[in-house]
Image (cartoon, coloured by chain):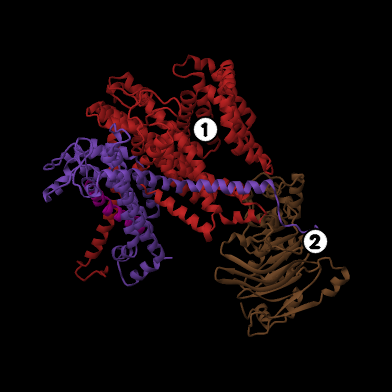
């Protein structure tokens, strides 16, 4: 595989267009074109990715190129495999005994499922934010400092904590009570704290698994604003079941439909206004899923 | 972003530490397996020697047990009889009371009453058994002896089994209650929908549905009673007897009786030098007891596993 | 099926009657065992406190001064549970402090002595604590864990080698000063943390200073008291008085909890007034068997001189060792089974086998564990017949399955989302366990361990098998010394035919054992309540 990651600006312009079109795999009756789009440098790339939970197939031969420093959204009905794909990227699926994968998934040009890859090292470069806010039952400060401590980072802890909380737009709300328990924060604040915790170790990629689904509308819009700011420094991959959210914040959108099949991947505008596949159009317009 | 992608993650010292802790924790868990192996080996080795000295037929079929007075006789039947007698008595107390208690807790009791009753019931199993033995000897026997027409010895099987029955009530009630709680409400509602009363639902629907769990609790309680030592040592006496007649069988409750466990204590406290047959008899009886309780526990587990399957 | 239909004549209520009768039958069954046990406990307390020698008027006074106020307080706690919790906190701190103090005095003064304690304190305890604290402040220093393990393994032999030197030092500075440095001052540091950071009550430095000052200033007073040496004072200050002061302070600071003082208050005042009244008037009070003399003297053939002291010390020594062994092994095994063991494959099969094995071990009769102890620890390892260490190992194996099962439950109760968060940050398995899983599971693990220790302290049959003495006239002098234990002494005395023993001395022994059990259980319940509150 080894997609060249050091393409020039000019090449990037060119590859902004649709460049590869794979015929649909698995002999499905409908003509599904799994499209792969290249913009910017590809940082995460999957080829023929299959994932099984025991006997159940959760992802079917997914090909996907995620561009650097952009927001890529994954949408689809529940059980379609979008979260599974997310958890493949930082190998969180390793924690599930029955999970098994085939194919390739590369991060920064390196297949993360190679034998010599250590999932712990991988996760230190790919941060993750979960569906429900899950701060540790420790102080706000200790939550943000957690990653730095476990990674033996020799840094000025106080300033990194402050910096991260500022980036997560939480600093003003908590700067006077850094030593209080993180569990005393509101749900929205907790989720922003989890984002601060994830970016404190300066990862390359931030994976977000429906980060706003447990929050109220005001907290959700704060998280969305935050994502738009974060993308200047990080690559963001976000799973959401909320199509409006995907349309609002993402640059690219991947649509997964039942059975773990990636049906279409393109610029968000294209997906929502002029999708190639009839099934995606049905899903977007609410006829299906 | 770095140009070289190294995800091999050699964290040197941390890696050593990780694998070291894995080994340490595994060894901690392995202690339990070593314990089991230790129990089996420690019991079997002396038993093999013992069975070389005392024929298996004498040990398993002999109706006399007299380890101290020459000529020594090692028949386990009187001890097994004593054990079964007292276990039977305890079961007569614990099984009805425990089952009814479980029904009350799962079907009738309000949440607040349950919250009070459950920890109180647990206390019953938490009192040291030597204390129960003392209760049986010093308070229960004189109390029963005061009943006209009941001639009780100072040491007797009756008060030991009564007190043991009280002790194992929580074993019956807590597991039975769990299995009754596992009966889905839809089953109850189906019966109510047909016009059943609460009594009909409890006795006619919940109990049959939870039967395997209830049976498993009975067996577990019996296994506990068979292995119980201090109550019988303190209150039931040390006379091994095997009734030859039916009236002797009935009478056994009112006189001193020896169980397998109390025979072990007798052998363990007498000044036995390590190398005698009586010393090895201790282990042979121990092995018999171990096998009996193990079989009961496994049977109870198997039955309990079935009831879990039923409602998963 | 019968139904509740009422027929025209009104006699159709039979089926409902049956239902009501059945409901009351089940209710009666539920309380039958509890009632029977309460009656028996009533008898034993009656005997232990020699109540029969008291006259009716005394009972009237007792009911009026003690029973009614305490019942009133209990009724009050139904409306104000916070006060009840505060009272339970005060009770268990007091009793736990006394037990802890007794345990410490047993280990330090009776079993090891100040010189040996000081030697191992310097080479094992102090380095471990220092490393632990350093590890907490600098969690990225990955060598700390290994260094701790090193001190755990190498510390004891080094301590033994250095004993001549440390003994000389102790001889120079004196035992009481050793306790000042090794117990009071570290205790004051813990106090400083608790007061300032944990409970946020007030100035920690000031509190710690006050504690050290009290330790020193009270010495002239202590010297005048009989029975209390300077060493005992230093120990009890650390285990009892300082924690009690903090608990009192904490509950005084909170308006709602203040009412909790009424419970212990009315009880103590009632007993006090009752004693004064009994003393000053011609009223005949009870003549308790369970008294100070009983818990501080050795057994005797004469009932009125008999005491439980050596057996109490023996039991406490055994239990302290059992607690250490089972905590380490139990938590380790539970962590392996919950956090390391895979669900499938060969590893999964091994883990399943271990789990089944543990649940079956929990059902093995205790007397069989005695045989295991006899074969392995007495005969094979030659640890001695009826020694403290043999008893501790045997009882540890006995309760280990229970400790593992409850520790597994506590670990399983830690929400998976926290583990995911930690792994998602790139934490290793051990980092996740140490930073996220264990801190959250520890209260639950402690609760389960204390309850299991309650089982161990009452066990008799295995102790008989390994030859623990039924009667000992002096407490054990080290872990390899022969010992007795409370249940063994009760067992021995219960076969004495005399009424004075059966209804006096043994009853007092049973009460002692039950008081110890009650204290341990109330500490466990308190921990569990705290744990459950933090869950919310």
Depicted C31 relative to depicted C185: above or below: below
Chain B is shown in which shade? purple
Secondary structure type for disc 2: loop
Examine the residues drawn in magenta and state their main secondary structure.
Answer: helix
CA–CA distance between discs 2 and 1? 55 Å
| Residue C326 in the image, given as x and y percentages of width and height | 47, 41
The x, y position of residue A138, in whole percent, is 63, 47
State which chain is coloured red: C
- Judge whether B211 appears above or below C104 on screen: below
Q: Where is residue A193 in the image (x, y as percent from the top left)?
A: 68, 53
Residue positioned most to the front: B52
Chain with brown colouring: A
In the rendering, which numbered label is found on residue C248? 1
Image position, residue C188 (x, y; %): 59, 29
Q: Give the range drawn in magenta.
A: B81-106
Query: Between C308 and B71, which is closer to the camera in this rendering?
Result: B71
């Amino acid at each position: 595989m080894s997609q060249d990651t050091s393409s020039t600006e000019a090449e990037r312009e060119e590859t902004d267009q649709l460049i590869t079109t794979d015929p649909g795999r698995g002999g499905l009756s409908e003509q599904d074109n799994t499209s792969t789009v290249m913009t910017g440098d590809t940082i995460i790339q999957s080829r023929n990715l299959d994932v099984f939970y025991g006997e159940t197939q959760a992802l079917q031969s997914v090909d996907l190129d995620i561009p650097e420093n952009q927001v890529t959204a994954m949408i689809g009905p529940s059980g379609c495999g979008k979260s599974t794909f997310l958890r493949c990227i930082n190998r969180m699926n390793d924690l599930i005994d029955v999970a098994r994968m085939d194919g390739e998934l590369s991060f920064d040009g390196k297949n993360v499922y190679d034998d010599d890859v250590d999932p712990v090292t991988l996760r230190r470069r790919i941060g993750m934010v979960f569906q429900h806010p899950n701060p540790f039952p420790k102080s706000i400060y200790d939550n943000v400092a957690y990653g730095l401590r476990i990674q033996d980072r020799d840094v000025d802890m106080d300033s990194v904590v402050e910096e991260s909380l500022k980036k997560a737009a939480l600093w003003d709300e908590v700067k006077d009570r850094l030593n209080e328990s993180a569990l005393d924060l509101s749900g929205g604040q907790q989720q922003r704290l989890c984002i601060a915790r994830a970016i404190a170790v300066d990862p390359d990629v931030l994976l977000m698994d429906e980060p706003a689904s447990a929050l109220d509308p005001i907290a959700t819009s704060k998280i969305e604003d935050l994502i738009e700011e974060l993308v200047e420094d990080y690559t963001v991959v976000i799973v959401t079941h909320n199509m409006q959210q995907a349309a609002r914040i993402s640059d690219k959108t991947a649509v997964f439909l039942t059975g773990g099949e990636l049906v279409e991947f393109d610029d968000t505008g294209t997906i929502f206004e002029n999708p190639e596949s009839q099934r995606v159009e049905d899903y977007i317009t609410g006829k299906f899923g | 972003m770095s140009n070289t992608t190294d995800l091999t993650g050699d964290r040197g010292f941390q890696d050593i530490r990780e694998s070291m802790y894995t080994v340490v924790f595994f060894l901690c868990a392995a202690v339990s397996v070593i314990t089991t192996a230790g129990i089996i080996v420690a019991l079997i080795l002396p038993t093999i020697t013992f069975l070389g000295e005392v024929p298996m037929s004498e040990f398993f079929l002999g109706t006399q047990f007299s380890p101290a007075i020459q000529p020594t006789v090692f028949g386990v039947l009187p001890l097994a009889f004593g054990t079964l007698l007292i276990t039977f008595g305890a079961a007569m107390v614990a099984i009805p009371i425990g089952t009814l208690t479980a029904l009350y807790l799962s079907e009738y009791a309000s949440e607040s009453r349950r919250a009070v009753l459950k920890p109180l019931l647990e206390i019953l199993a938490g009192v040291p058994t030597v204390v129960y033995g003392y209760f049986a000897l010093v308070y229960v026997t004189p109390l029963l002896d005061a009943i006209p027409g009941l001639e009780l010895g100072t040491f007797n099987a009756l008060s030991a089994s009564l007190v043991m029955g009280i002790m194992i009530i929580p074993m019956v009630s807590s597991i039975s209650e769990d299995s009754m709680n596992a009966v889905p409400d839809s089953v109850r509602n189906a019966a109510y929908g047909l016009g059943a009363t609460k009594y009909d639902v409890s006795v006619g629907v919940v109990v049959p549905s939870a039967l395997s769990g209830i049976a498993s609790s009975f067996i577990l309680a019996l296994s506990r009673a068979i292995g119980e030592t201090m109550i019988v040592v303190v209150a039931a006496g040390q006379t091994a007897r095997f009734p030859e007649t039916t009236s002797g069988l009935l009478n056994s409750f009112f006189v001193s009786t020896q169980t397998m466990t109390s025979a072990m204590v007798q052998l363990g406290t007498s000044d036995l030098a390590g190398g005698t047959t009586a010393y090895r008899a201790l282990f042979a009886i121990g092995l018999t007891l171990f096998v009996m309780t193990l079989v009961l526990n496994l049977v109870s587990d198997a039955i309990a596993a079935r009831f879990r399957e039923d409602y998963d | 099926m019968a139904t509740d239909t009422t027929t025209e004549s009104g006699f159709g209520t039979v089926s409902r009657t049956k239902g009501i009768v059945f409901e009351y039958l089940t209710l009666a069954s539920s309380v039958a065992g509890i009632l029977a046990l309460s009656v028996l406990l009533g008898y034993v307390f009656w005997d232990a406190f020699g109540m029969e020698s008291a006259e009716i008027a005394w009972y009237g006074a007792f009911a009026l001064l003690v029973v009614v106020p305490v019942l009133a307080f209990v009724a009050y706690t139904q409306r104000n549970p916070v006060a009840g919790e505060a009272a339970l906190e005060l009770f268990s701190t007091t009793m736990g402090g006394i037990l802890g103090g007794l345990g410490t005095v047993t280990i330090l003064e009776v079993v090891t002595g100040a010189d040996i304690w000081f030697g191992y304190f310097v080479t094992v305890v102090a380095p471990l604590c220092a490393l632990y604290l350093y590890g907490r402040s600098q969690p990225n220093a990955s060598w700390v864990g290994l260094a701790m393990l090193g001190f755990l393994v190498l510390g004891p032999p080094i301590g033994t080698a250095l004993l001549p030197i440390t003994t000389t030092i102790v001889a120079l500075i004196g035992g009481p000063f050793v306790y000042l440095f090794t117990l009071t001052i570290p205790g004051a540091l813990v106090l400083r943390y608790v007061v300032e950071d944990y409970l946020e009550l007030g100035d920690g430095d000031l509190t710690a200073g006050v504690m050290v000052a009290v330790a020193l200033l009270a010495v002239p007073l202590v010297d005048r008291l009989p029975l209390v040496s300077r060493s005992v004072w230093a120990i009890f200050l650390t285990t009892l008085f300082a924690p009690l002061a903090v608990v009192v302070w904490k509950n005084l600071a909170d308006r709602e909890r203040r009412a909790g003082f009424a419970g212990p208050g009315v009880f103590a005042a009632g007993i006090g007034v009752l004693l004064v009244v009994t003393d000053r008037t011609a009223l005949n009070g009870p003549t308790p068997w369970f008294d100070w003399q009983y818990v501080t003297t050795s057994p005797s053939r004469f009932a009125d001189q008999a005491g439980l002291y050596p057996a109490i010390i023996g039991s406490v020594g055994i239990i302290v060792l059992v607690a250490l062994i089972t905590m380490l092994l139990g938590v380790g095994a539970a962590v392996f089974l919950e956090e390391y063991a895979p669900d499938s494959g060969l590893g999964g099969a091994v883990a399943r086998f271990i789990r089944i094995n543990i649940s079956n071990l929990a059902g093995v009769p205790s007397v069989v564990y005695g045989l295991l102890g006899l074969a392995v620890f007495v005969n094979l390892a030659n640890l001695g017949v009826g020694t403290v260490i043999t008893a501790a190992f045997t009882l540890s194996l006995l309760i280990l399955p229970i400790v593992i099962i409850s520790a597994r439950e506590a670990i399983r109760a830690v929400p998976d989302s926290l583990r995911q968060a930690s792994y998602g940050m790139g934490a290793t398995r051990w980092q996740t366990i140490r930073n996220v899983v264990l801190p959250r599971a520890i209260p639950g693990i402690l609760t389960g361990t204390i309850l299991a220790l309650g089982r161990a302290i009452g066990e008799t049959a295995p102790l008989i098998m390994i030859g623990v003495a039924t009667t000992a006239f002096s407490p054990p002098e080290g872990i390899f010394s022969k010992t007795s234990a409370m249940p063994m002494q009760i067992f021995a005395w219960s076969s004495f035919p005399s009424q004075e023993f059966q209804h006096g001395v043994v009853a007092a022994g049973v009460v002692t054992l039950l008081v110890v059990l009650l204290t341990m259980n109330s500490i466990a319940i308190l921990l569990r309540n705290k744990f459950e509150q933090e869950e919310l």
